[in-house]
Amino acid sequence: MRGMLLVTKRELGSYFNSIWGYIVAAVILMIDGLFFNAFSMTEEARYSFEVLRDFFYFSFGTTTIAAILLTMRLVAEEKQTNTIVLLDASPLADWQIIGGKYLSAFTFLAILILATFYMPLLVMVNGKVSMGHIFAGYLGLMLVGSSTTAIGTFASTLSRSQLVSAVIGGVITVFLLISWLLAKVAEPPLDDVLSYMSLFDKHFRTTFMEGRINTKDVVFYLSVSFAFLTMATRFFAARRWK
Amino acid sequence: MIEVRGLTRYYGDFPAVRDVSFNIGENVIVGFLGLNGAGKSTVLKVLGGLLMPSAGTVKFQGIDALDAPDSLRKKIGYLPEDPPLYKEMRVQEFLTWCGEIKGMDSASVSKRLPKVIELCDLKSVQDRIIGELSHGFKKRVGIAQAIIHQPDLVILDEPISGLDPVQIVEMRKVLKSLKSECTVLISSHILSEISQTCDRILVLHGGQIVAEGSEKELSDKLSRAPRVELVLRGDQDAAQKVADAFESVTSVKFTALQGDLFRAVVNLESDDREELVAQLIGAGLGLRAMSEDQSGELEDVFLGLTNAPDGTAGRLEAKPAKESEAVEDEASEPTDDADTAESDEEDES
């Protein structure tokens, strides 16, 4: 565990010491703010519930984009600059390296998600906010962030190019986002599988986004995170044999 | 300390290292000498636990590298040719982090750090950002990260490449000082470096060890027939007749010089040069100068063993035919640097 935390510490340092982390944070917070202003702070009278629901709707999108942008460098950059040798030559197990990198990206993303907290609080000015809705929404965003960070970490182990990693991570994420559409045209039992895999439609839209917490959705997101981290560790470990 | 038996390593279908076996003891500096693509880096990566062997065994202090790769890496320090450094970190911060990921606790790192900084002469830059350092200092930081955890084995791949002459001399001192606390393996294709730094040399070519021993032992392996260069005055035909009649002359080559002077390069089967000179003088030729081709230097040994295309290869004996084939095989690879190809393949994966 100590080894994993050491990797996390260094990776987090690299986010805060490089301009990339700040650029991603600034862009994501700006987009979040613009969306909030455009969709939630309108002249038209709306229920606080609807405003919060919309907020979590676009925050879902910005969270997935941020996760892909933050994770694309995790392993790919180390391969590109050859600093991967430091980790290869260390006694750290592969799961510690992958776990540490994932944890650093997720921690940064979590800080980014929590930095949007002022927006639901603004709703309080003119409305009545349900703290349960806010809690459920943020829990959902954290779980989505965890899953997409794991997907991005996995994608980053596949290439030495950050761009290619981002594309792979993006493709996987988009597939999981639109799988509910594919489910509509697929035959049974594939339609059920595709529908279940939907990151947004099945597990976020009708639950976390509307202030409800369903254990099945929590398990789904944690399972996606675990599955992609396991695959990332396997692919990462394979480099010693290739 | 290190026991390697039948080590083979493939990259895809390409055998970078084939059936390599050797033993290495404690507190010695061993050099891996070879041309680019000879398999040096691959052997070192396998010894460092960065790559797993395709076949064969690598034992370190009696433990098979495949049985406990993670714990063995605690005892090994590794520095590739291009030092792997996080350029945004400061030297001291980086070395502390390296010590910690190699299993040291904070107190041990704090205790060890000043010694390593002194050993690698990093005092003047210890608080600076790594990205701002010169290449020589980056190499030293690279060595420092390899030895921070007091490993029993330090592996340095091309440690002097890219250094200027002053830095090379300083690096040599650092390498020699490491010997007192651990075994050091270095690879290089710079012959003088290997001969000045190492106690023992393993010559790799085409993924195989073609020779091993000290510089002297390697030189002794080169049993070359003497070659004499003479500057003579007189009739070249008379010299040719003497050479033809002289039993141990295997070949002779004449080159006309000024006037009636000419040069004769004579290859002899045995060292009968006094007799040859006596016969030439007896035939009425004047001897102006005689010199002997320098034999037995490490460079000759290396070129001979690796069958380099400089015309010296034919002078070697006991050179297996398959090694010549290996050279051709390697030359037909898409890249002439297998080490580069290796890392590329690795990275692509």
Image (cartoon, coloured by chain):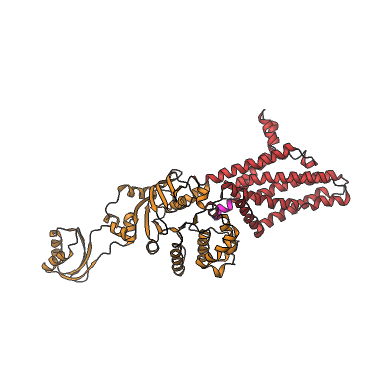
Chain colours: A red, B orange
Residue in view at x 72 percent, y 56 percent:
A26
Front residue (pair B280, B4) = B4
Q: Residue B131 lies in what quarter of the image?
A: bottom right
Q: Residue A9 lies in what quarter of the image?
A: bottom right
Q: Which residues are magenta?
A: A74-83
**Is A155 on the left or on the right of B250, as rendered?**
right
Front residue (pair A167, A201) = A201
Front residue (pair A71, B59) = B59
Magenta span: chief secondary structure: helix
Q: Where residue A96 sits: x, y (%)?
A: 59, 48
**Is B271 on the left or on the right of B170, as rendered?**
left
Whether residue B206 appears in this view of the structure is: no
Residue in view at x 23 percent, y 68 percent:
B291
Q: Where residue B304 sits: x, y (%)?
A: 31, 56
Height in image: B240 above or below B22? Answer: below
Is residue A156 part of the magenta span, yes or no? Answer: no
Height in image: B334 above or below B92? Answer: above
Height in image: B255 above or below A53? Answer: below
Is residue A75 part of the magenta span, yes or no? Answer: yes
Marker count (numbered): 0
Height in image: B263 above or below A60? Answer: below
Whether residue A153 appears in this view of the structure is: yes
Q: Residue B249 lies in what quarter of the image?
A: bottom left
Q: Where residue B2 sits: x, y (%)?
A: 42, 52
**Is A170 on the left or on the right of B202, as rendered?**
right
Q: Where residue B294 sits: x, y (%)?
A: 28, 64
Front residue (pair B275, A225) = A225
